[in-house]
Structures are given as structure tokens and as C-alpha cells.
Image (cartoon, coloured by chain):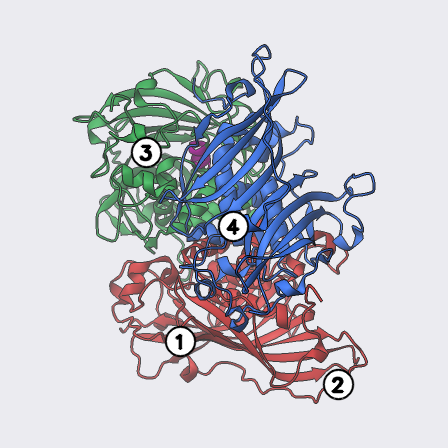
Chain colours: A green, B red, C blue
């Protein structure tokens, strides 16, 4: 049948391996667009000489740009019929991606659990992203709730994979050849150091960014993510929200960009530990961001760089100063929170 | 006089050759933008390794991106004073265009016919697009209705050039070195084959795309097409439609991108046989697409690839399933149809 | 304190040197985006073969794209707390910028004058933009009115730097190796020559361009200019104008692009002598442009190229033909004027 209709819950088998279609070559144009779409200003994807000075062979593609493109590849097979993207974990950035690299994605089904309704189920996959040299550059686990097409299809054996709360410091990858010991001397060292952040610290990022329909659709198309909820205003009129939804990855990227002011030197995203897309974002919403330092770690054998585990909270239509507590005592989110992301960055140390 | 006012009907002479201004170098950034603007996901412009595996020296520029840029070059001389773009025919894609190539356009007047009103006329041109090595990469015929500036100017001899209904299979160009015999083994072979399509078959593509003012203006500016109807909301207030028109080429590209689901392996546009821009598209409209297989041809001496002649129908603000017949018995179009494009693609054969 | 709050008036010292953060590598993607965002069609950034034929090693980055990116770098240190961008002068384009070049910006404080209110003051800076080879490619003076954070901070000695009304012809830089003596023979020579323009001449450019929120925000983010007035619709609701302001540089670029029709061969911006952003532009406004020839100069030792000093007037929501006088007798601007830019271009001479 043409076109294919994507996979339903009963189509997934534990251990099944899916090679996702259409490898995507990334280029300089993608980097420029990513800056224009999100306001990204972190130094590594911005500046070739700074990247060289830190041991890269070129300025790398922004970590989240690579993530979104790779994620988009998995949508047709994994989540085209998804009721909800429930979560992701153990997202690890293993190697830099450069302009000219081609990303190919595959996924293995690592968990299945039919819902008690019998009409849908949860699928866990481990996705693996390779470059054109068959090096794995990125990997993650995510889980989605998917419709059954045939409600009478038998339930699979329940298997829920064990998942860590966060990526352990010893599992974080530092790019080969990376050396931040000279970072103090370069023109961009005008922010703060690993040493300057303490667990429990909160940073209210000052800027806001209003999202337009054209923005988020351009971004989502750039990632070749064809989930219909982002593009089809007519179909979405009859949906719960009555309009197009902004791709959660775009919210993530805008908030990461907003977090530049106060986290200028958070050079590398090494891991995403988990994330909640707490509420939808729509065109016309203005996004703000606050960060909390969850933990800080020295890295084995490194004096030049350390890790910060951060919480990035996206807030809409309210300056973050007014968000006194992100979650209330009963665990509910503040009404304006849209994103609660737990991720780990690498940031130069002062003593270097 | 500055600025120049473009050509009026009486300025054209049969056999006249016009070299159009401003050759345009295409780059990786144009490819990225094209994906972001249209949602294009076909594999050749997306993936360098896949392009290599098929015999290309790099991933090519999307066929329609090259077409739109080339078309834009001809606007100032041919259609700045056009009342209507009446049609095009014999559009043949002769050689791949790569990032770094520069397109230069020229046109020859091959037909003239003054309207009975004496106030305007139809001009036919053959446009030829060369790359920086003076190789012709693209050619077409189009005809436009153009105002006379001076209604008393004498009518030229009427000459209407003969035009074929479609580009014959033997006139289709396969890129030099192209070989799809290994296509089955690559990660993108996850669609259908030439063998899987039959004349008369209809494919309803599932996705929709809502067009924003920013989208279509970005696209049209990228092509350096300066036709005013797309950009000047103030001037367009007094026009027939009261607002900006979406460039017909943008509609074509969005529909081609929507047609990916069901025509994943329609790798190459070899020809455009003709097209009707049936009704205008405006920002806010949601586009859908359906395809009909008009014909299928083996290609001389090729077992790896065949040709499909397709009809791509663009529909606005109505899911295509509700468009039971594109044209009614008296030849009129369904009220929601905006585009009726007749084109020919090359698509790998299963037996390869 | 994180994030940093930018500099206030009392933080500036005469002679102080600031190295601005985050060098920015420009690429082909930036050029493509710049065309798509502004409608730029001048030939040098469009066409590699034409650039080669004039002595460039590649097509250069558009002069104003380089300017805006460089300008954006200075915002966090110079104008984050600015009440007003009062003016700029002596903007000189010294060397071409190419895809792959990295721009670094620094500024020296060359003037200070506290306002009589004691609550703010004017700061003059000379900014210098170097490429990755430490060659200065661009320099300018600008002055801004900046708040004091501490009104009791003592006033600095007043120093107002002397500024010329315009960049003298002998100070204009022609790119090394530039030679336009063969310009007549190339496909783009389809405009007017230096010889064809006379001081006092006015050119009404025919096209208009409506600005969308997505456009101007994409452009301003591309330049990594993070001035909040352009992005945060919620915060701007309480501002004087009640909404986001379009970055003045975007208006400049759109007007320069509109001026292509009538100034096709104004190949190079050699200097910006000064400029008034007369009134704000908002999304939804339609921009038009007219040019006046202020002066024309031969250049020492050159027969192939001359200079035109031009006035580029941006008008919104009114065709320029209706703007009979840009300024009335008492010096006030026509109510629809948004930009009054005094700049100098290099343009081939016919006699070459």
C-alpha cells in the first residue's frame, strides 16, 4: 500500500531492528539556519578558529541540531502513529558531527508494554546514529505510546527496560583531542567557569523569544521531521488544542539558546538525562528559560574541563523571575512551564 | 531610464535572444534552505553517500530548486509585465546541478501572437540554462501574456510554435554515470519501485502543509525572483485578490515534497511536461497533494531504472480523499485544486 | 553575577579597549539566508564566476551581511543598556569577506559625554573587525546613549571625537586585485554605469517588500544580535510602541536590495557615511526605497571604476513616488520615511 502508514503497536517485536530511511548529509547551511531559527550563540558551532584552538578539526554542528535531524529520521517508523512521546533517557553525544557528515539512524525495540485498555501500548527503542564512517556519534533511548491498529492483536510479553536516572560522569564522552587548557586566553572566555557554578544555584536567563509559525515549521522541516501536528493547520483545527503544535525539539533549542546568557561556556552537551515536555507551545508564545545546577563533577584525569548536570526549564508567557518554584509541593508544574530538561554539559575549568 | 521597466509585447521579436542578468552560484546553504522551506525529503539532495552510490560526484541540488532559481533569472526580461504565466512545456533536466555550480540563463523568442484586443499578446520563449562550464543543465519552453505599452504598435506576424504534449521517453536524460543497480542494498530503499506502479493508479499523500507569508517570500527571494505580486502587501491590496500571491513554484515544491510519502523513490525529475496553476494559493492555505500515474516506460538499454509519467495535483484546504475527481465531466477543476502538474520521474526498477 | 548585565555609562572609560565575545565564522549558508531574508540580488555575492572575472578569489559575502554580523558582536558590551543608537560614521569596508572567514570584533571608547540629567550619557566607540588572519576588514564609529546604573557615579571628562561628514574618496578601499575593465563583456552588465549617474538625480525603485515577524527575527538571530526589542513580544507589549521593533539593519538591507532595480551595478559598498533610523519599522509594514545621487568621484589612478555617494531613503507603507520631498523646509522628515542612509558605492565606468 502506498503510502506506508507507519508502525502500530502490534507491529513492534522485542529485539526488532529498524534501519530508518534517508541518511541526511549536514552542511554549513544547516548550521546557519540553526542559528537563525533558534538564536544559538554558543561558541563552538559559531567559530572555526575557537574550535581549532580546542582540538576540533572544524567547528562542529550544534549538538541539538544533530540530535533533531537524527530524531527526525526515526519518526516515520517509531512515532508516526504515536499518541504521545513519553520520554527519553541516556542520550549520549559520543563524537562531534561536522559539516559534510552524513547521519544514518537505526533503532532496536528494547521494551514493550501493552496498555490495560488493550488499544495501545508503550514501545521503548534504543536509537543509534552513525556517521558516514560507521562511527556512532549519538545514541538514546526513547519511549512512545502507540495506537494498535487491530485491537484484537495479542499483547506481547511485557518488558520494561531498566533506565538510569542520569548518565554517569564516567560515561560522558569528551571529543578526541579536546583540550581546553588554553581556553582562558581566547577571545570568548568572557563567561563563567565550571568552578563558578554550585549545585542548587539557579540562573534566570534574561531574554525572551517569541515563536512564529514560520520559525518552528522551518526548523522542523529542516530536520526532515514530518510529524503532522506541526504543519497541518486545517487538520489541527479539530485537535485538542485547535492549532499546530511547536515541535518540542524547537522549544528545547530556543531555551538552550536563551540559556547562553549565564552559561556562555557550557560548550558541549555531553548527555541528556531526561526531559518532560510539560505543556505544548504554540506560535505566538514567548519563551523564557531558567537553569538550575543539579550537580557538578570532576572528570577522570582532566584538569581542563568538568561536567555540570543542569536543569533547563522553559517557561512561556511569563518572565522567569515570577516562577518562584518550578514544581509545587504536590509535584505539579507551575502553569507556565513548558519544558523541564535534565542534561549535562562540559565546561572549562578555571584552574586550567 | 532607471530603473528599467522590463519588456512589453511590442519589444519582443521572433528569434530574439536575451541573456538574462546575474548568474547565480548555488551552494549548500541553498539546499538546506530548500529543505526547510518546502519539507523536501527525497534522498538524492539529502544524502551524499547515497548520491555517490548511484554514481553522482556529490549530492545534487534538488531539481526544482535549480528550476526555480533559473526561472527567477528570466522574470525581469520575460514576465515582469506579464498579465499571466500561461504555461510551460518541454522542461528537461539534462545534467545534475551541484553546490558550487553557477547557473546562467538565456531565452530565445520562439513565438508571438497579438491578442485580438490589440492591447496585449502572447510570447513563447525557449529558455536555456547553462552551468559555469557552458553545459546546458536545463531547458524549457514557456509562454506568457504580456501587456503592450503602446497599443498602436503594429502587431507582429503570428507564430505559434509546435509543442509536444509530453517529453518522449527517449528524450529523457539519465545523469552520466548513473547506476541504480545497487539501490536495493542501501538504507533508503524503503519505498516502492518502478515495477510497483501502474498507469491509472492514484496515490493520496497523507500529509498537509500550511503556508505562511514568511515561507513563500523567503523561498521566492532565495530564487531571486522579484515578481512583485509575491512581496508587496500594500500594492496587492488593490489587486483582484486583495493580498499577496504565493509563487506557483513554491506550491509545486511543497506538493512534490508532500508526494514523498508514496513516491519515496521517485529520485529524479527528468521532465515537466506541462502544468496548470489552476487557482492562486495564499498564506494561511493548507496544501495537500495526490498523484496519478499517467504512464510508465522502460528506458532504452536500462534494467536499473524506469520512467513514470505522473500527474501531481495540489489541493488546498481539503484533504485529498475528498477530491474524488480532479476535473469534472465538463473539464472544470474541482474547486479546491490549485496545481495540476504533468511531469516525469526516474525511479529504480525492482529487477535490478 | 550570572548572567552579566552589560555595561552602563559609568563603566566606560576613555581609551578603554573591549574585545567582544564569540568570533563568528561565516559560511555559504549565511549568504543563502541573506538572499532569502532580504531579497539581495547584487551580482558579486550572487555569482562566483562574475566575482572571479573582477579579480576576487571567490564570491564575497554581502557587505551588509558582514556589517550586521560584526555589529551584532558589539551589542552585548556596547548597547545592551542603550537608550538609543544615536548614529554611526566612518564605516569603511577595507577588505572582502569570504565564506569561511571568521570575524572578531573589538571596540575602543573614543568619546564620553554625560547628559545634563546626570542619569545617562553618550559613548562613542571605534569598532574594528578583523578576519582570522588579523586583517582588518571593516571599521566604524558609532555612538549610543546609555543609562547610568548609579546616578551618583561621577561624570567623566567630556570628550566628543571629531567626525567627518563623509568618508573622503581617497580613503575608499578597492579590493586588492580588483579590475572592472572587462565588466562590459559579462552577462551582468545589463545596468547603468558610473557615467550614467549625475549628482542631484533621484531614482524611485519600483518594488516593495512587506516585512514579517519571522523574517526580521531570523535575520537578527542570524547576526547573533541579541537586542531584546526585536524578539520578545511579551516584554514589548509594555514598550512605547507596544510590539517588537524590526532591527534597523534589516531595514537597511531590504532597502539596499530594493535599490537593485536602478543601481544594478553598484557592486561594492565602500563606506557608510552616516545614517538616521528615522522611525521604527514593524512587522506588516511594506518597505519601499528611493535613492539620490549626492556626489560622484573619480578614483585616483582608476579608469575602470568610480564612486557614487548615495542617499538611500527607506519609506514605509507609501509608494516612493508620493514622497515628493524627503525632508520638508524645517528639516522634518516626511511621515513615512524610516531610513535615511548616506553611503558610498563603487560602480564600473563605461569608458573602461
Is residue B83 within the magenta segment?
Answer: no
Whether discs 3 and 1 lie on one chain: the answer is no
Between B317 and B299, the residue placed more toward the observer is B299
Whether discs 3 and 4 lie on one chain: the answer is no
Residue position for label 3: A269
Residue position for label 4: C63
Q: Chain of mark 1?
A: B
Q: CA distance from mark 3 to mark 1?
A: 46 Å
Residue position for label 1: B307
Residue position for label 2: B155
Q: Taking B278 as reference, is B120 left or right?
A: right
Q: Position of residue A322 (x, y in %)?
A: 53, 18
- Report if the CB atoms under discs 3 and 2 are less than 8 Å apart: no
- Report if the CB atoms under discs 2 and 1 are less than 8 Å apart: no
- Report if the CB atoms under discs 3 and 4 are less than 8 Å apart: no
Q: Which mark's residue is nearer the viewer, 3 or 2?
A: 2
Q: CA distance from mark 1 to mark 4?
A: 46 Å
Amino acid at each position: 500500500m502506498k503510502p506506508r502508514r507507519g508502525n502500530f503497536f502490534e507491529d513492534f517485536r522485542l529485539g526488532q531492528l529498524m534501519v530508518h530511511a534517508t541518511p541526511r548529509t549536514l552542511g554549513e547551511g544547516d548550521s546557519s539556519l540553526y542559528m537563525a531559527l533558534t538564536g544559538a550563540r554558543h561558541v563552538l558551532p559559531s567559530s572555526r578558529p575557537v574550535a581549532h584552538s580546542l582540538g576540533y578539526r572544524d567547528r562542529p554542528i550544534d549538538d541539538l541540531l544533530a540530535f533533531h535531524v537524527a530524531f527526525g529520521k526515526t519518526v516515520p517508523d517509531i512515532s508516526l502513529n504515536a499518541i504521545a512521546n513519553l520520554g527519553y533517557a541516556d542520550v549520549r553525544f559520543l563524537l562531534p558531527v561536522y559539516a559534510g557528515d552524513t547521519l544514518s539512524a537505526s533503532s532496536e525495540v528494547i521494551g514493550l508494554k501493552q496498555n490495560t485498555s488493550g488499544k495501545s501500548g508503550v514501545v521503548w527503542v534504543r536509537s543509534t546514529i552513525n556517521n558516514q564512517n560507521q562511527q556512532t556519534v549519538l545514541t538514546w533511548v526513547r519511549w512512545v505510546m502507540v495506537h494498535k491498529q487491530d485491537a484484537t492483536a495479542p499483547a506481547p510479553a511485557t518488558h520494561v527496560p531498566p533506565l538510569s536516572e542520569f548518565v554517569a560522569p564516567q560515561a560522558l564522552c569528551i571529543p578526541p583531542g579536546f583540550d581546553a587548557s588554553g581556553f582562558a586566553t581566547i577571545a570568548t572566555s568572557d563567561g563563567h567557569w565550571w568552578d563558578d557554578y554550585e549545585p542548587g544555584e539557579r540562573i534566570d536567563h534574561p531574554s525572551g523569544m517569541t515563536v512564529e509559525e514560520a520559525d518552528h515549521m522551518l526548523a522542523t522541516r529542516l530536520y526532515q521531521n514530518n510529524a503532522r501536528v506541526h504543519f497541518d493547520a486545517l487538520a489541527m483545527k479539530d485537535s485538542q488544542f485547535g492549532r499546530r503544535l511547536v515541535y518540542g525539539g524547537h522549544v528545547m533549542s530556543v531555551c538552550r539558546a536563551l540559556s547562553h546568557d549565564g552559561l556562555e561556556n557550557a560548550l558541549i552537551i555531553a548527555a541528556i538525562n531526561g526531559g518532560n515536555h510539560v505543556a505544548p507551545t504554540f506560535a505566538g508564545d514567548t519563551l523564557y528559560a531558567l537553569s538550575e545546577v543539579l550537580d557538578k563533577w570532576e572528570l577522570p584525569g582532566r584538569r581542563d574541563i568538568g561536567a555540570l548536570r543542569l536543569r533547563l526549564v522553559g517557561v512561556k508567557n511569563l518572565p522567569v523571575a515570577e516562577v518562584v518554584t518550578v514544581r509545587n509541593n504536590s509535584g505539579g508544574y507551575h502553569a507556565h512551564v513548558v519544558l523541564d530538561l535534565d542534561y549535562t554539559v562540559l565546561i572549562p575549568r578555571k584552574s586550567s
